[in-house]
Image (cartoon, rainbow, N blue to C red):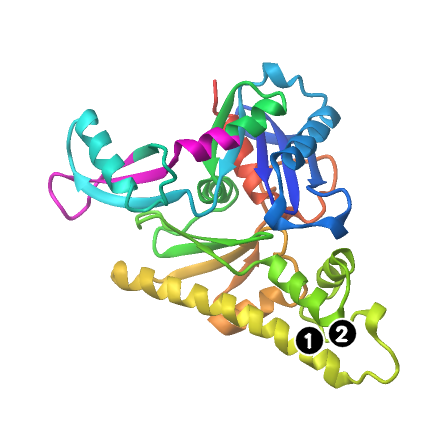
Amino acid sequence: MGLGIDFGYSNLKMIELDRIDDQFSIKNIGIKPIYDDLNRFDPENISKTHWVSAIQNLSSEFNIQTKKIKNAISSLSGSKVSIQQLTTLEMGKEELDQSLEFEAKKHIPLDGTEAIIDYHIMGQHPNEIDKVNVLLVATTKNTVTQHNQILLDSGYKSNIYDTDAIALVNCYQHNYEQSDDGADVILNIGNQTSTLVVHGKSLPFFTREINVSGYHFTKYLMEKNNSDYETAENFKINNGMENKQLESNSNESETTAESLNLEIAEKSILSNLTDEIRKTLRFYVKSNNQVFFNKFYLSGGSAMLPGLKEFIAENLNVEVEIFNPFQNISSSNVVENPPQYAIAVGLALHGTEVK
């Protein structure tokens, strides 16, 4: 059994997977809004009590005895977490620990507490003798302590941490076959940020957070139409890029020009997103001998917005597919908006490996 807990800013997702040999099935799955009243949603003022309440509610629905769970996996994300693949000289563990801790401090904003690192030696560098490739994850002690306290207050005593990017790769590898050549791209569009991951069988792992997300669309709709958060969010989910206007603020005198302005503004936000993706992929190509990209996957709560897939495909000239985290996981019920569970599934898959 594996339990994955995805700390979203808008919703908290939890999934419990059963495993028999190499067969996986959903035992429990659930989602809880961080705010019971969506119109009080404020991403700048989410406190740990919001997450604790959501975790406790879902744990109760799952009938989980939290203190007995040894494989609850949650993820760290944001600017205080760094993930990168490095090439370094082969050396002993103690020397490597010191070297990587020094390297980690260059990439995370220090908050007065020590750096916490974890790493995985991925193997020999294919072109340089006496060098190895290392996947380094770094954060600060304060970040881990704050995250751990939420889980402790929720009743979980044994906690293991992952990152959003690595959870996405775990989920991807479980559900999709990858070509021997080139790389695939996963874009997880969250409420506050979008996580982009580049993954290839024989290519360096790369991830970057992009500050364009689902909330940017909702916020624009709220300001443009003087609407509340819930109305704007529902409009976004139902209409996406379609040329429509919020009914609560429309009247007979308003023309197509008004709704056209809405569409243009939405496309402007999306253009910011595709511009950032393009810059990131160009950097990756330049750094990795003109690698090519096979397919582009969309995951996260906003992945299924009407028109989004088509906009990205047209503007980046790539083949885009909606990510299905349950492609190789059986379920007795239909899961609503599957892409939003990609991170939670990746975390739960990790949990099934914990002894």
Q: Residue furthest front?
A: 112
Q: Is 72 displayed left or right of 220 in the figure?
A: left
Q: Residue at x 70, y 36 (%)?
A: 30
Was residue 129 drawn as part of the magenta stretch in this picture? Answer: yes
Q: Which residue is mark 1?
A: 262
Q: Over which residues does the magenta segment extend?
A: 121-147
If the image is split into quadrants, where does the N terminus sit? top right
Describe residue 274's horizontal placement relative to residue 308 as left or right: left
* First of labels 2, 1 by sequence position: 2
Is the residue under label 1 in contact with that under label 2 (CB below 8 Å)?
Answer: yes
Of 290 and 55, which appears nearest the observer?
55
Across and down, in percent, residue 115 comes to 33, 34
Residue type (three-letter) at the residue carrying disc 2: Lys
Q: Please name whichever residue, 353 or 273, is drawn nearer the observer in this view of the structure.
A: 273
Disc 2 from disc 1: Cα separation: 8 Å
Q: Position of residue 195 (x, y in %)?
A: 48, 52
Residue drawn at the location 62% of the way across and 46% of the way down? 45
Residue annotated with mark 2:
244
Residue 263, percent from left and from top: 67, 76
Q: Is residue 101 above or below residue 268?
A: above
Q: On the picture, is 284 further left or further right than 161?
A: left
Give above or below for 111 relative to 192.
above
The image shows a total of numbered marks equal to 2
Residue 191 lies within the magenta run: no
- In what element is the residue under mark 1? helix
